[in-house]
Structure formats: structure tokens, C-alpha cells
Image (spheres, rainbow, N blue to C red):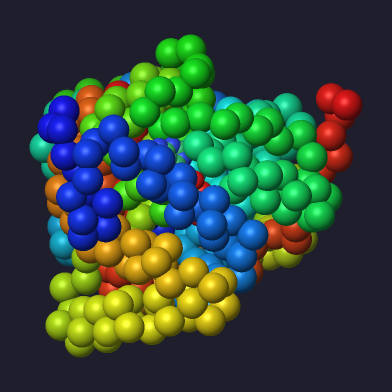
Amino acid sequence: MDNTTHFGFKDVATKDKQGMVRGVFDSVASKYDLMNDVLSFGAHRLWKRYTIASSNVKTGDKVLDIAGGTGDLAIEFRKKVGDSGQVVLSDINAAMLGEGRKNLTNKGIFGVDFVQLNAQYLPFEDNTFDCVSIAFGLRNVTDKDQALREMRRILKPGGCLLILEFSTTDSEFLKKFYDFYSFNIMPKLGEIIADDKDSYQYLAESIRKHPDQETLKDMVLEAGFGFCEYHNLSGGIVALHKGIKA
Amino acid sequence: MQHFVLEQALNFLIQNGDVNLEPLDQKIIRFSLKDLPLEVDFVCTNNRIFVVNDINNVSDVDIKLTANVFFALFKGEDLTDLLKQDKIIIHGDVKTAQLLVDMLQAVDIDVEETLSQYTGDIVAHEIGKITGEIKKITQESSNPLEALKDSVSNFLINPSVPKTYKNNKH
Ligand SMILES: C[S@@+](CC[C@H](N)C(=O)[O-])C[C@H]1O[C@@H](n2cnc3c(N)ncnc32)[C@H](O)[C@@H]1O
């Protein structure tokens, strides 16, 4: 791997990125859910609902949610797999995972396992899960290719990978609006609501640095998945990629 | 979009209709609709169907038919009859095609009645509406998949009543 990588629009030493990302999420953890609702006008709930609906997860399945943060997906997966299934909510960041645990408890959701892990090194046996998901997390991972290979390894044959992530819109109008919003309004709202302009500036920048739909699809196939398709949501501002391990 | 919707509808019906997909495991079945720009692969794996439209895959069987005939399969039309009438063209492993059709028809039990046992009346009613829609659109709609999409999207926006699970392990 190269010695440098990007952290938002900055070039940083590869070995430093993970710590810097940790700093961002340590800082936003307690206000994360509120900010998500405000910044996306609530749309993240619809994107996540679509992700769950597309998962084909059923009773008895084993599901791993990576970079799961406050647990929105894990909660819905838990409802789908029932008591005979298993859901693991994982995140690299202890503060985010702590918020996730609190959130699930408050919502009366039990029976979810919590694991602190880095997406690049998944501490599970080969062929374990029916579904692996990562929502708004992949862009923060330093070596995405390695993470994708790991996700494939721990999926059962026929298992399904879901990547929900900000992406690229073709619409000139949406692009202009979105750029203005991300670089002017988002950091300002971050400053006002969470007293943290820099973290939200990073989040906006990291979205622009993330591979577009076709590039990510190629990366998923390159990692060894048999099939990969994506579906644009909100005009391509967000895309759901779905990979199937052949 | 359509194939995502189709996939959700199929799997919902498979799961709730208790259909065993094992005989079709690892099979790829390609559907091409003659009258609509739709070519999709049904990838059967891990006891579910993924609907993909990456036509670079090597399929086990190719099925060419019109949209109406496609939906007629859900309604229990006999594959052999459709083949005899040239309403359906099959290349490749006909046995796989027959297995799939058997499966689709196994789903076409009294969907509404069956689903209500598993999912409660709200979802059953929605799926019942979808099945009704399928029947209606085979006669009326110039774009059956759009209509199917609408009714399934509607269902997705109003999913089943949430349920809180207790932890049995502790
Ligand atoms: C924007 S949040 C998304 C949280 C949640 N999935 C959601 O959609 O609301 C991104 C999460 O990715 C986690 N993360 C960043 N790098 C990671 C890595 N290498 N491995 C696992 N999680 C990581 C962060 O700690 C953070 O909780």
C-alpha cells in the first residue's frame, strides 16, 4: 500500500489516517444521531430502510454490521433474523459503539452482539455470515480493498454484502446544490449543533474522495465477489452496492 | 430499479410461502422480456433469489417470453402448454426452468391467506394487493413492471408492525 492516503482533502501518512478518523468519531459520537437527522433532513432513515429491504435477510440468518455506529441497521436486522439468528454490531470506535449499545437498550432491542473491530481485519472464521453491511463507513476505511476482501472471506457462499455510501450524482443541479450544502452549510451546522466544524468539514470532504458508483462496483468485483450491482438513491447522492459471494 | 423490486417481491413470497429453493441452488436463470427492455438473471443461492442484470454471467438456462407470459407463470399457467404454443422460448437446461416455474407456482397458493399466518394481516394485505396488481396489470397495463414497482414500493414504505425482541440468552 502507498505511504500516503487522503483524509478528506488532505494527504496524510497512511499509518495516521485511522487515528485521525477515530478523532472525528470520538468527537461526534454523542451528537451523531441528531446530526444525521438534521444534515440529511431525515433521509438517512429512508436510505437505511431501503438497504434493509434489499438485504434479503431472513429468520435465522447471521448478519454483521460493520462501522455500525449507533446501530440503526443492527436494530432492523435484529427484527428480521429473530431469536434464531445472530446480529453483530461492530465499529472501530469505542465511543460510537457505546452510543450504539445505549441506543439499542433504550429501544428495548436485546440479543445483539457488540464487537470493536477494524473493517480491514475481521475476527471471524471464513464463511460465517449470510449478510455483511456497512453504511456510511467504507469511505473512512484506510485500505478499502483489503476490507472488501475480508468481508468476502467471512460471508458464506451466496452471502450478500451491502454497502450504503454517499456517491456521485449525474444531475448538474443536484451537484451544485449538494456542493454548496456540504461545504458551506454542513460544517456550519456542525459548529452550531455539535460545536465541531472540523469533523463535519472532514465528513463533507471524505464524501468527495470516495470512489464513484462504477469504481466501487469494480472494487467489489475485484475483491472476488461473483456479482455486484448498485442502485442510486436520491439521484445518486447515495448509492447502495450489493455484492454476492459466488 | 425493477429488478430490485422484483427480487424483494420474490423473496418475500418465497420466505413466507415456505418454498424450498435447494433444488435450484447455484443455478442462474436468465429472463428476457421480448416486449420490455428487461433482461435479468435470477441467481439462486443460499436459499434465496438475487435478481441481477449483469448479463456477463453464464446462465444455466435462458427464458425468453413476453411480460404477460412472465406474469402468467405466477398464476399457474402450465409451462409445457406455453412452450407448445411458442409463448415461451427456452435455451439450455429445461429442467432448471421447470423447477423455477414449479417454485413460482408453489408461491401462487392463496397468497393473502397463507401470509397472514406468518406476518399478520397488514403485510398479507399488502402482498395480496401486489398479487392482485400482477393479475390486473397483465390485462391492463402497458408497463407491468412499473405498476409492480409502485405497489411494492408502497409496501416497503409501510412495512410490518415493529416488534421488540427480548434477549433469550441472558
Ligand atoms: C458515519 S458513521 C456511520 C454509522 C452508521 N453505520 C450509520 O449509518 O449511521 C461511520 C462509522 O465508521 C466507523 N469506522 C471508521 N473507520 C472504521 C474502520 N476502519 N473499521 C470499522 N469502523 C470504522 C466510525 O467509527 C463510525 O462509527
Position of the N terminus of chain A by quadrant? top left
Locate residue A8 relative to residue A37 in the image: left or right.
Answer: left
Locate residue A61 relative to residue B124 in the image: left or right.
Answer: left
Q: Is residue B40 above or below residue A166?
A: above
Judge whether residue B10 can be spotted in this image.
no
Q: Nearer the viewer, residue A60 or A104?
A: A104
Q: Position of residue A215 (x, y in %)?
A: 15, 48
Judge whether residue B158 can be spotted in this image.
yes
Q: Quadrant of residue B82 in the image?
A: top left
Q: Quadrant of residue A136 in the image?
A: bottom left
Q: Position of residue A178 (x, y in %)?
A: 29, 79
User: Residue at the spot x=46%, y=45% of the render?
Assistant: A22
Q: Is residue A70 above or below residue A218?
A: below
Position of the C terminus of chain A by quadrant? top left
Q: Nearer the viewer, residue B56 or B62?
A: B56
Q: Position of residue A69 (x, y in %)?
A: 56, 48
Q: Is residue B133 above or below residue A94?
A: below
Q: Position of residue B58 (x, y in %)?
A: 15, 29
Locate residue B66 relative to residue A105 in the image: left or right.
Answer: left
